[in-house]
Image (spheres, grey):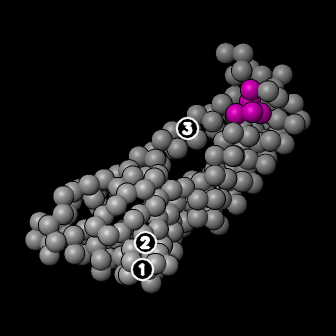
């Protein structure tokens, strides 16, 4: 329990402050996205997920039309309650990180890191849940009979003549960097 009673050196406090800033900045950048390319769509159809919204609604309308043929339900930003909750959670984590900065007490840092780990796991599960929900619950009355599938969270797959690439974007990397800065502060810059 030595870490629980320890405190941060000034550079550790600065790292927590930078981590808090990165958490807030990440709200304004995309976290995840997918691109579908097919001969009829050589420029690709793009769906970009921010922590507050879905972007490229024109492409999303086309994707929903195409998904209809294999019986996939419509993707609608209003169905994702997470898009209202995530910014609040990020702001709360940023405030907690600043609490660590101002107090220098590592017990608060441990709490923030623990909660971030839990939130990260829940976030990854949430993405998997949605991908699984969309891919595994295809309408059996769809015009094209297609075997249910779970799209990869990161990577590529092929559906009919569509090549799909999915992965994390800048906002997610900023989150990861924020977490790493906190870990480095707790590991290397505490007394």
- Quadrant of the rendered image containing residue 189: top right
Q: Is residue 85 visible?
A: no
Above-or-below relation of 148 to 45: above
Counting residues from the N terminus, which is met first, the one under dot 3 or under dot 1? 1
In-image side of 83 versus 175 (left or right): left
Residue for badge 1: 41
Quarter that holds the C terminus: top right
- Residue 117, disc: 3
Q: Crowdedness of circle 1 by 10 Å Cα count: few (<14), some, many (20+)?
A: few
- Quadrant of the rendered image containing residue 59: bottom left
Can you name the residue that lies furthest to the right here? 10
> Where is residue 121 drawn, in percent x and y?
48, 41
CA distance separating discs 2 and 3: 34 Å
Q: In terms of secondary structure, what is the magenta stretch mainly?
A: helix
Judge depth for marks 2 and 3 and give the one in front: 2
In-image side of 18 versus 76 (left or right): right
Q: How many marks?
A: 3
Labelled pair 2, 3 in contact (Cβ < 8 Å): no
Labelled pair 1, 2 in contact (Cβ < 8 Å): yes
Q: Crowdedness of circle 2 by 10 Å Cα count: few (<14), some, many (20+)?
A: some
CA distance separating discs 3 and 1: 39 Å
Q: Which residues are magenta?
A: 183-187
Counting residues from the N terminus, which is met first, the one under dot 2 or under dot 3? 2
- Residue 37, disc: 2
Q: Secondary structure at mark 3?
A: helix
């Amino acid at each position: 329990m030595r870490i629980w009673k320890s405190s941060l050196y000034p550079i550790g406090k600065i790292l927590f402050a930078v981590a808090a800033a990165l958490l807030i900045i990440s709200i304004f950048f995309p976290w995840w996205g997918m691109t579908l390319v097919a001969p009829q769509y050589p420029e690709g159809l793009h769906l970009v997920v921010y922590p507050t919204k879905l972007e490229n609604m024109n492409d999303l309308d086309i994707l929903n039309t195409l998904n209809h043929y294999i019986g996939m339900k419509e993707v609608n930003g209003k169905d994702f309650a997470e898009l209202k909750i995530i910014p609040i959670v990020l702001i709360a984590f940023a405030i907690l990180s600043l609490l660590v900065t101002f107090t220098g007490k590592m017990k608060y840092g441990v709490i923030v890191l623990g909660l971030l780990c839990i939130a990260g796991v829940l976030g990854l599960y949430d993405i998997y849940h949605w991908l699984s929900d969309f891919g595994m619950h295809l309408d059996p009355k769809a015009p094209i009979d297609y075997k249910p599938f779970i799209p990869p969270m990161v990577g590529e797959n092929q559906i009919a003549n569509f090549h799909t690439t999915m992965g994390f974007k800048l906002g997610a990397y900023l989150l990861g960097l924020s977490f790493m800065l906190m870990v480095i502060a707790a590991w290397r810059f505490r007394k």
